[in-house]
Image (cartoon, rainbow, N blue to C red):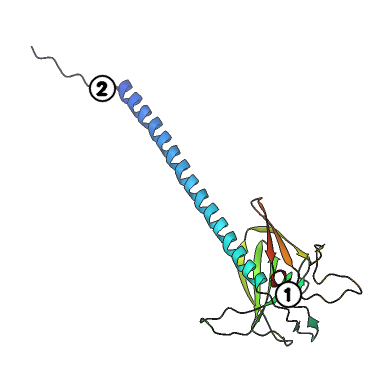
Amino acid sequence: MMKRARGLTLIELLVAVAIFGILSAFAYRALSVVLDSRGRIEQENRKWRGLALFFARLEQDVATAVPRPVRDPGDVLSPALAGSASSVRINEGALMLTRTALATEPGGLEAPRRLGYRLRGAVVELLTWSVLDQSPRTEPRVVAVLDGVKALDLRYLDARGQWYLAWPPPLANAAPVALPVAVEVRLELVSGERITRLLPTAARTTQ
C-alpha cells in the first residue's frame, strides 16, 4: 500500500515565512548600512577634494601677489595687499590683493589682476575685477569657491616675525609695507574640522 506524501502544515509554513522575513530584514539593513557608508565616503571625498582645490588656488594667488597698490571706487589708494577681520563694504573681501595673471600661452604676458576672498554665510567667495584701478561703477565678478565653512580667520606675518590681524600693520610712524612675508589661513568647517595653512608671499623669497 503506497504512503501518502506529507505536505507542510500551516504552522510550518508560518515559521518558514517568519524566518524568511527576518533574513530579508537583516539583508536590507546590511545593504542600507553599505549604501549609507558609501554615501558618507563620497561626501567626505568631495569635501576634502574641494578643500585641496581651494587651498591650491589661494596659495597660488598669495604666492604671486605683487606690490602694486590700486585706486578703489572712491579714488582712494588701497594697499597692494589689504587684510581685515571681515569685509566692510559689499564689493570688498576680507583679503584683497594684486597678483600677476597667469599667461594663457608659454612666454606670454598678461596684466596683473585684483581679487579678494571673503566668507558670506557658509560660503567662501572669490571676487575678481577686470581692472586694477576702479571707477565708481566697477563691479567684481563673484564666484563661490568653497562651501560648508563656519569661520575664516586670517593673520599676517611681517619680516620681523610679528603677527597682525590686519594688513598693513596699524603702526604709526612705520615705513609703508607692501606685502607680508606670509598669510596664515584658519578655516573652521561646519562639520567641525579646523584647518590651518601658512601661505608664503613673494616678499619671503626676495629677502
Tag 2: amino acid: Leu
Q: Say which quadrant the N terminus sits in.
A: top left
Locate residue 9 relative to residue 99 in the image: left or right.
Answer: left
Give the CA separation, mark 2 to mark 1.
79 Å
Q: Quadrant of residue 20?
A: top left
Camera-near label (2 vs 1) is 1
Which numbered circle lies on residue 205? none
Tag 1: amino acid: Glu
Which numbered circle lies on residue 92? 1
Q: Quadrant of residue 180?
A: bottom right
Query: Residue under circle 2?
Result: 8
Residue name at image x 65 percent, y 82 percent = 112
Query: Where in the figure is residue 23, as x and y percent of width and height?
Result: 38, 31
**Residue 93 appearing in the image:** no
**161, 123: nearer the viewer:** 161
> What SS does tag 1 mark?
loop
Query: Where in the figure is residue 67, as x and y percent of width and height?
Result: 73, 79
Query: Where in the figure is residue 111, as x and y percent of width and height?
Result: 63, 85
Locate residue 110 relative to residue 81 in the image: left or right.
Answer: left
